[in-house]
Structures are given as structure tokens and as C-alpha cells.
Image (cartoon, rainbow, N blue to C red):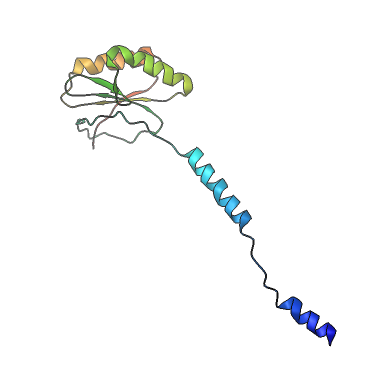
Amino acid sequence: MKDRRLLFADQSHVEEINISPLIDIVFILLIFFIVTTVFVEETGVEVQRPQAASASQLEKHSILIAITADGRVIYGGNEIGVRGVRGVVKRLLKQKDQPVIVQADKDAPVDLYARVHDEASLAGAKQINLATRN
């Protein structure tokens, strides 16, 4: 009888599930998704882009430069002017080869766009695009 009591005493012990490895895996996945997320740096201003029938999607990794209707050239929320375009583009191209997208307002002067395009080209940009809307 003593053997029988010991057998039942051992079986009444409740087993616990260890969730520590599960929590570790969740944190590793969270870190993985945070590290691999692409952050697109916007220009910081809203421009009225011109319409184009041949518009197409470009890749997310790009240098965005905005030209406002009043002639300001903006990158990352800061006004850089036409002369600042070459330095910004050259610095960013050293990190990674990526296209330049110019978001010019539809009322912006065409000669200002041409000067921004030239500065980006002189900085070494191989692909310079004008952002439009469909």
C-alpha cells in the first residue's frame, strides 16, 4: 500500500510549461524586424506634383529633394538651397548608391529644377527622377 500512495502522490504533482524560450524567440523576431525595416526620409514639405501619364513606382531607397512653389530647395525638412544639393547627394551616395528623386511643385520654376538636376548629376547621381502623380 505504501507503494501505491507514493505513485498517486507523484501523479498529483502539477507540471508547468516553461515559456522562457518562447519569449526569447519573440524578442529575437522583434529585433530582426526592427533592424530590417526601411525608413524613408521624407522631404518635410508638401508639394503639388505635376501629373504624368507615364508615371511609375520607384524604389524606396532614394534621396528625396523637394522644390517648393516659392523656389526653396528642401532636404529632410531643412532648406539647403541649390548649392547644398551637391554636398547632400555626394554624402549620401558615399553610404549607398541610390537614385535621386526631385519632388518639384508644379508651379516651381523650370530653371530651378534644371539647376537642382545639374547639381545632383555633378555629385555623382546616376539616376535622377522627377516625382509626379498618376
With respect to residue 100, does 82 lie above or below? above
**In the rendering, at what x and y percent does residue 72 appear?**
22, 19
Question: At 18% across and 22% down in the image, what residue appears?
Answer: 108
**In the rendering, at what x and y percent does residue 2 appear?**
84, 84
With respect to residue 41, does 17 lie above or below? below
Question: At 38% across and 18% down in the image, what residue appears?
Answer: 89
**In the rendering, at what x and y percent does residue 75 appear?**
31, 23
Q: Could you tell me which quadrant the N terminus lies in?
A: bottom right
Residue most toward the bottom? 1
Left or right: residue 13 versus residue 103 is right
Left or right: residue 3 versus residue 78 is right
Nearer to the camera, 46 or 108 = 46
Nearer to the camera, 53 or 98 = 98
With respect to residue 59, does 92 lie above or below? above
**In the rendering, at what x and y percent does residue 63 appear?**
37, 25
In which quarter of the view is residue 80 placed? top left
Q: Could you tell me which quadrant the C terminus lies in?
A: top left
Nearer to the camera, 43 or 126 = 43
Left or right: residue 116 versus residue 32 is left
